[in-house]
Image (cartoon, helix red, strand yellow):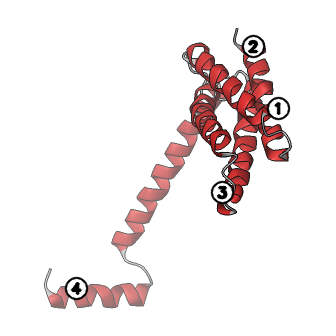
């Protein structure tokens, strides 16, 4: 397209407010959206959504609570470290392991994984070890809460999976 033709086209667009080309593009986009909306609405009515959320909500809540309490415990340990107190070093290490394992387990539980049973055994073992270490420091509210959450998760695993 020459510069002259381009200038004439721009003049026409300014005069009319919109070009035929842009109008056609807009109409095509609107038609595409309307079609996509109608097909996805029909598919949503026929599609079974019952398995889109976890089938083990109590276990999911226990896993999330455990990782939440673990984060709080780690934060408490870090404050102690900055104050020069290294008493909680082993506790922080066990909590870090627990959070790593429980983080993965949370994804599996949320997606109703076929690996839940096998993975739950590792999670259960790590939570027992974490609770045992945190119990040594029960004078710290965060350590006690983490130990309790780990024990609760072990119980939830036993009730839900085994």
Are the residues tagged 4 and 2 within 8 Å (C-beta)? no
Q: Would you identify the image quadrant in which residue 152 lies?
A: top right
CA neighbours of label 1 inside 10 A, class few (<14), some (14 to 19), many (20+) = some
Residue shown at the point (83%, 46%) measured from the top left = 140
Per the model, the C-alpha gap separating discs 4 and 1 is 73 Å
Residues marked 2 and 3 touching at CB (< 8 Å):
no
Asked which secondary structure carries label 1, the reply is: helix
- CB of mark 1 within 8 Å of CB of mark 2? no
Residue at the location (78% across, 41% down)? 143
Eyeballing the image, is 142 above or below 78? above
Which comes sooner in the sequence, label 1 or label 2? 1
Q: Position of residue 97 (x, y in %)?
A: 58, 35
Quarter the N terminus occupies: bottom left
Name the residue carrying label 3: 81
- Closest to the observer, 82 or 28: 82
Q: Name the residue carrying label 1.
A: 148
Which residue sits at x=78%, y=13%? 159
Measure the C-alpha gap from mark 2 to mark 3: 35 Å
Disc 2 designates what residue?
Answer: 158
Q: Is residue 54 visible?
A: no
**Nearer the camera: disc 2 or disc 3:** 3
Mark 3 or mark 4, whichever is nearer to me: 3
């Amino acid at each position: 397209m020459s510069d002259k033709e381009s200038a004439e086209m721009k003049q026409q667009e300014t005069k009319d407010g919109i070009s035929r080309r842009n109008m056609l593009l807009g109409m095509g986009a609107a038609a595409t959206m309307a079609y996509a909306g109608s097909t996805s609405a029909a598919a949503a009515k026929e599609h079974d959504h019952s398995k889109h959320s976890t089938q083990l909500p109590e276990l999911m809540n226990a896993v999330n609570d455990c990782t939440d309490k673990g984060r709080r415990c780690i934060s408490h340990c870090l404050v102690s470290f900055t104050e020069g107190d290294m008493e909680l070093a082993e506790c922080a290490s066990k909590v870090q392991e627990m959070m790593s394992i429980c983080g993965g387990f949370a994804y599996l539980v949320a997606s109703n994984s076929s690996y839940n049973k096998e993975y739950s055994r590792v999670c259960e073992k790590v939570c027992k070890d974490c609770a045992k270490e945190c119990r040594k420091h029960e004078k710290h509210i965060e350590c006690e809460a983490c130990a309790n959450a780990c024990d609760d998760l072990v119980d939830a695993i036993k009730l839900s999976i085994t």
